[in-house]
Image (cartoon, rainbow, N blue to C red):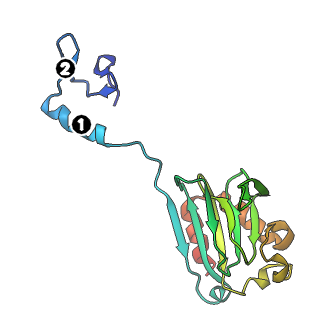
């Protein structure tokens, strides 16, 4: 709905049937206009709702993978997150084209750049990473101690490390990222179900 210029005064927007009194100094809404203005003034422009999906695979994949996580349109008010050691190993498929960073835990300076796919090993200390704002990611969370079939390196060498996926993972993981990027959201969830 577009509004005539005469209906826009000092940030007030009203329907085309608006009326002004006293040489257009004071706006007096009609009964029908009041409902519109109440809705208009109480509504805020908000970003699209976040999409966050967790899928627990069935047997036999569940022997190795605890969960698949997909999210996008996350808009936190903070800029960094700190993750405590939890014994988990993850593979992160970043579905955006801009890099993510790992920060120094004390100075918050960028110490590592992560692009496309990376493998996050078991942690003995916390890690500081971006909050996920404007990200779109697909994450594989492995069962504790069960990521070895997917890695070309011994897991003890990956402790407290985040490594480019090309160095540790099979080519199929990178192909999976490219395929997911080409799909719509509904197709992503269908792939997860097929993986079972």
Q: Which x, y percent locates residue 63? A: 66, 89
In the picture, measured across the screen, residue 22 lies left or right of residue 160, that is: left
Q: Which x, y percent locates residue 10? A: 33, 22
Please name the residue shown 32% across and 22% down the image.
Answer: 8
Vertical side of 37 occupied by 111: above or below: below
Residue extending farthest to the top is 23
Residue on which disc 1 sits: 36
Residue on which disc 2 sits: 19
Vertical side of 192 occupied by 111: above or below: above
Q: Are marks 1 and 2 in contact (CB under 8 Å)?
A: no
Instruction: Please tell me in which quadrant of the rendered image residue 82 appears.
Output: bottom right
Looking at the rendered image, the quarter that the C terminus falls into is bottom right
> How dense is the environment of label 1, judged by Cα within 10 Å: few (below 14), some, or many (20 and up)?
some
Q: How many marks?
A: 2
Q: Tell me how far mark 1 sits from mark 2, CA to CA.
A: 14 Å
Dot 1 falls on a residue whose secondary structure is helix
Q: Which x, y percent locates residue 23? A: 20, 10
Label at residue 52: none
Residue extending farthest to the front is 106
Please name the residue shown 19% across and 32% down the image.
Answer: 33
> How dense is the environment of label 2, judged by Cα within 10 Å: few (below 14), some, or many (20 and up)?
some
Dot 2 falls on a residue whose secondary structure is loop
Residue extending farthest to the left is 31
In the picture, measured across the screen, residue 31 lies left or right of residue 103, that is: left
Looking at the rendered image, the quarter that the N terminus falls into is top left
């Amino acid at each position: 709905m577009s509004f005539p210029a005469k209906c826009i005064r000092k940030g007030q927007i009203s329907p085309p049937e608006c009326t002004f009194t006293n040489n257009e100094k004071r706006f007096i809404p009609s009964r029908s206009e009041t409902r519109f203005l109440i809705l208009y003034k109480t509504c805020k422009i908000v970003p699209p709702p976040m999409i966050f999906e967790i899928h627990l695979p069935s047997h036999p994949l569940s022997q190795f993978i605890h969960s698949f996580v997909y999210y996008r349109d996350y808009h936190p008010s903070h800029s960094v997150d700190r993750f405590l050691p939890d014994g988990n190993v993850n593979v992160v498929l970043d579905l955006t084209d801009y890099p993510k960073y790992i920060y120094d835990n004390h100075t918050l300076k960028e110490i590592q750049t992560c692009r496309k796919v990376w493998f996050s090993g078991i942690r003995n200390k916390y890690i500081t990473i971006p909050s996920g704002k404007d990200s779109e990611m697909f994450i594989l969370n492995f069962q504790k101690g069960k990521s070895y079939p997917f890695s070309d390196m011994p897991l003890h060498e990956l402790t407290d490390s985040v490594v480019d996926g090309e160095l540790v993972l099979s080519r199929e993981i990178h192909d999976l990222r490219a395929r997911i990027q080409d799909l719509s959201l509904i197709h992503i969830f269908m792939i997860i179900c097929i993986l079972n």
